Each structure stands twice: as structure tokens, then as C-alpha cells.
Image (cartoon, rainbow, N blue to C red):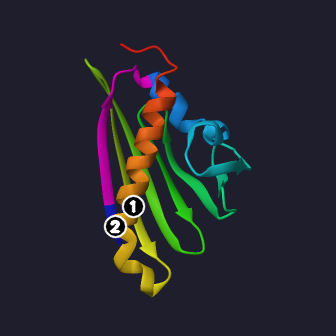
Amino acid sequence: MVSSQIRAVIPCRRQAVWQVVTDVERYPAWRSGLSRVAGAAESRFIEYTDKGYETVFTTTLWEPCRRWEFDMENSGMKGRWSGVFIQRPDGTEVRFTEYVQGEKLFLRPLIRAYLKRQQAKFLSDLKRAISAYDTL
């Protein structure tokens, strides 16, 4: 299993960052490459890329404004994601960690680079979405 983590401090209150990250129904409005989200519920949802590729997410831990964890699975991988939200004087520190196992052997060597790109894109998109909220 491959792991990858990205950290950043976003100059915004933790509650606002939490709200944007956990409001999965609004993901298509701010996340690159995502066309829709179906079945959005507290414990399970499905994301569809612009190309129709689907990934199922199932929440395994929910600590409001502190931590969100879920399992994720699609035809190419299985894994889990962890998001930690820490209030700092200069904003909210986020730590997003993914653990992924590729289902297709030929893709396994590429997973770490793919995760890094996806995490950087998610964080960049998140920062743009957060700009609509009050900053510190």
C-alpha cells in the first residue's frame, strides 16, 4: 500500500474549512475534474469524474471540525483517506493523508506520483473555494 500526505495552513477558521471539505454535494462546483456526486449522505457518497469514472467513499470516522476518515474504492484502487483539521493562530492546518493499493499491477509503480498530483490539485481547489469564506 502506498501512502501520501499533504499539509497546509489555510488562513481561515477551522469551521469554514471543515464545512467546505465535508459538503460533498458542492464538490462539483469547486473541484477540478469532477462532474457530479451521487448518494451524498453522512456515511457514503459516489464521485463521478468528467469522464464518468466513479469512486465510492464510505465514512469510517467523523469527528466534526477535527477529523474525517473514509474508505474509497473504484475499479483501479482501494484505499483510505484521512483529513485532520487543527486551528492555529494563523489559520487552519490541514493534513490530508491517503493510503492506496492499486488493483492493476501495471499501475502500482505510478500510484505515488498520481496521489501527489491529486492531493496538490485538491488543496489548490480547496484554497480557491475557501476564499469565499471569512479569513482570519
Q: Nearer the viewer, residue 62 or 10?
A: 10
Q: Name the residue furthest left.
A: 89
Kind of residue at disc 2: Arg
Residue occupied by mark 2: 112
Residue sitting at x 29%, y 42%: 7
For label 1, the residue is: 115
Classify the position of the C terminus by image quarter: top left
Marks 1/2 in contact by CB < 8 Å: the verdict is: yes
* Figure check: 13 above or below 115: above
Which segment did they paint magenta?
Answer: 4-14
Q: Main secondary structure of the magenta part?
A: strand
Which numbered disc covers residue 78?
Answer: none
| Amino acid of disc 1 | Leu
Query: Which residue is found at the position 39% from the left and 56% from the top?
Result: 117
Distance from the alpha carbon under mark 1 to that under mark 2: 5 Å
Near mark 1 (Cα within 10 A), the count class, few <14, some 14-19 or many ≥20, is: many
Say what secondary structure mark 2 lies in. Answer: helix
Residue at image location 56% in from the left, 43% down from the top: 31
Residue 58 magenta-highlighted: no
Tell me if residue 9 is in the magenta stretch.
Answer: yes
Q: Quadrant of residue 56?
A: bottom right
